[in-house]
């Protein structure tokens, strides 16, 4: 029997911004439960919930102080159980975020660990002595700026934090730490969750000798993290054995899965994705930031997909174009689009044609754009520290919009934690649902078409050599084949076919007299393979 996750459509929900049910301006679990019908009607198979655990919210929940309870901002364990029950009744699986590379500095484990070098949890976090001159033990940087080390006067040592100083890294070299983390995950599995999204999955292990990272001569960005090649601060080979322990845990339960976030780019990310999903004893699937980048070329998409499949022929990938950490793709790729709606329609057609699992971030089904914020509206730590060169992640985290004419577009009765601005409110669900030509209805149509096409769900992929800006490939399984063609340009394109075919699904393409006419940002699904496409 084929596992449900292999061709699933996963809908990511950012709890703070989905639906406020108690008029405090912050989304919550009951609000999510209220709006699950929208997700089911879209054609999703599962939801992924960003963190809702008890947290000081220094990094919006990615700093966990209790792995087995709900932060009061979002509700209670009873609310979570009700959410899971409603999701399952609608046929939706439930995936939750697991942030186990680090905890909050308010977690009881860290409170004990920092007290001394002799207490029972002294080795549960990554501690190191200073250099003779009192400086940090090595040159590792934090992703959020500055050194990755913070001085703790009680122990007279530094502790490692790959992100905020309030997010100390757990020492996963310690078997006791591994056992404790697996126990927290078992808690949620027994509560009925169907899977985990593993945050920063390649950060779990560090070099035991704490060697300096080498200099990166190619870095040109505004961040300090990129000045180094993270040879020793992450991506350690020992991570594989821990992933195998995680897999063994999920395999104790029927139909569960794990998807890992690889916090890297370029060829390194492709190689890690392949290694982490190889065989049946590691992760079920991975995704990286390669599809979340500004690059929008046929060569790029082909390189990423082929790279992962060649590196791990039996591995599995999860693809997404937007999430809570990057500029929304309708804005990120705007220079390549005739208009927002055309670009958004092409994006879901392309994503739905890629081999593997696909993930949709809340609001992208509306063609939602990045919200422009002023400094006084920000909450994101990197943006607050490095504005305006780094604008941070708040612009993609503004509230979901439900009713065009309601206060705050139906998200909350009071001022929300991030503003709902007119440009975003204009794409509310009720207005889009009523418009047959809307982005929302295009998403519903495309996902419905994909569900009916075995070739798009689990077929093999074979790319077709065409010049930029044309991307084309065939998906084929059990005698059925679909050729997928995309014009990644604001200008129309025309291709010739050497063999007869017919158009499948809905698109604005025209097939006539052996020629395929694609409008700006146009796409087409053609019946069959070996069609001899050429320009």
Image: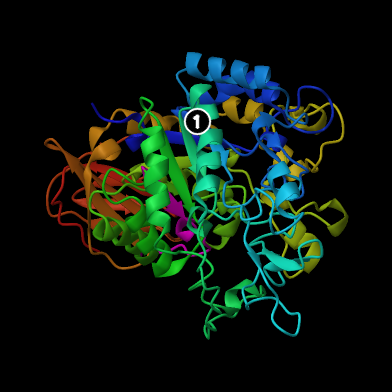
Q: How is the image coloured?
A: rainbow
Residue 351 against residue 40 in the figure, above or below: below
Please give the count of numbered marks on the rendered protein. Answer: 1
Residue 102 visible? The answer is: yes
User: Label 1: how many residues lie within 10 Å, few (<14), some (14-19) or many (20+)?
Assistant: some
Magenta stretch holds residue 288 = yes
Q: The N terminus is located in which quarter?
A: top left
Give the quarter of the image for residue 159.
bottom right
- Position of 232 with respect to 426 (left or right) is left
Rendered location of residue 206, percent (x, y): 52, 64
Helix, strand or loop at label 1? It is: helix
Rendered location of residue 11, percent (x, y): 52, 35
> Which residue is farthest front?
118
Give the quarter of the image for residue 271.
bottom left
Give me the residue at 33% from left, 57% from top: 275
Rendered location of residue 319, percent (x, y): 42, 48
Instruction: Point out the stretch of residues depicted in magenta.
Output: 284-298
* Residue position for label 1: 186
Residue 44 against residue 167 in the figure, above or below: above
Give me the residue at 61% from left, 73% from top: 140
- Position of 328 with respect to 524 (left or right) is right
Give me the residue at 57% from left, 52% from top: 101
Rendered location of residue 461, percent (x, y): 23, 50
Q: Looking at this view, is 124 or 359 the one in front?
A: 124
Magenta stretch holds residue 244 = no
- Position of 305 with respect to 96 (left or right) is left
Residue 446 visible? The answer is: no
Q: Looking at this view, is 470 or 499 the one in front?
A: 470
């Amino acid at each position: 029997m084929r596992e449900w996750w292999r061709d699933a459509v996963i809908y990511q929900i950012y709890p703070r911004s989905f639906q406020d049910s108690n008029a405090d301006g912050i989304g919550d679990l009951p609000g999510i439960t209220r709006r699950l019908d929208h997700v089911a009607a879209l054609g999703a198979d599962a939801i992924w919930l960003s963190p809702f655990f008890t947290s000081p919210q220094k990094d919006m929940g990615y700093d966990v102080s209790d792995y087995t309870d709900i932060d009061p901002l979002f509700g209670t364990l009873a609310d979570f159980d009700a959410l899971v029950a409603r999701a399952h009744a609608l046929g939706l699986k439930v995936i939750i975020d697991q942030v186990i590379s680090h905890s909050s500095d308010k977690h009881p484990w860290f409170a004990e660990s920092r007290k001394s070098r002799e207490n029972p949890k002294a080795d549960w976090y990554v501690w190191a002595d200073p250099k003779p001159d009192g400086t940090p033990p090595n040159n590792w940087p934090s992703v959020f700026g500055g050194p990755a080390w913070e001085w703790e006067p009680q122990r007279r040592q530094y502790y490692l934090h790959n992100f905020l100083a309030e997010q100390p890294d757990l020492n996963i070299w310690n078997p006791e730490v591994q056992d404790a983390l697996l126990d927290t995950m078992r808690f949620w599995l027994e509560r009925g969750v169907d899977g985990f999204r593993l945050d920063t999955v390649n950060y779990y292990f560090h070099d035991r000798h704490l060697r300096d990272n080498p200099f990166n001569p190619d870095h040109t960005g505004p961040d300090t993290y990129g000045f180094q090649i993270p040879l020793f601060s992450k991506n350690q080979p020992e991570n594989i054995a821990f992933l195998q322990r995680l897999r063994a845990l999920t395999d104790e339960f029927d139909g569960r899965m794990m998807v890992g976030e690889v916090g890297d780019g370029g060829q390194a990310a492709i190689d890690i994705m392949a290694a982490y999903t190889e065989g049946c004893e590691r992760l079920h699937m991975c995704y990286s930031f390669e599809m979340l980048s500004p690059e929008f070329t046929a060569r790029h998409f082909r390189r990423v997909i082929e790279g992962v499949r060649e590196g791990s022929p039996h591995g599995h990938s999860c693809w997404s174009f937007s999430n809570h950490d990057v500029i929304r793709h309708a804005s990120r790729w705007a220079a390549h689009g005739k208009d927002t709606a055309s670009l958004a329609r092409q994006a879901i057609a392309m994503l739905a044609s890629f081999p593997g699992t696909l993930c949709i971030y809340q609001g992208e089904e509306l063609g939602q754009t990045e919200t422009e914020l002023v400094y006084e509206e920000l909450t994101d730590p990197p943006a607050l520290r490095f504005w305006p060169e780094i604008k941070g992640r708040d612009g993609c985290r503004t509230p979901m919009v439900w009713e065009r004419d309601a206060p705050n577009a139906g998200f909350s009765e009071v001022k929300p934690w991030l503003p709902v601005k007119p440009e975003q409110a204009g794409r509310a669900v009720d207005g889009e649902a009523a418009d047959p030509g809307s982005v929302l209805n295009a998403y519903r149509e495309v996902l419905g078409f994909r569900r009916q096409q075995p070739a798009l769900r689990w077929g093999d992929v074979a790319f077709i050599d065409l010049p930029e800006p044309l991307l084309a490939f065939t998906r084929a399984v059990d005698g059925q084949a679909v050729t997928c063609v995309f014009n990644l340009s604001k200008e129309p394109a025309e291709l010739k076919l050497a063999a007869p075919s017919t158009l499948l699904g809905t698109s604005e393409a025209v097939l006539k007299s052996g020629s395929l006419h694609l409008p700006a940002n146009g796409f087409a699904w053609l019946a069959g393979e070996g069609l001899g496409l050429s320009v």
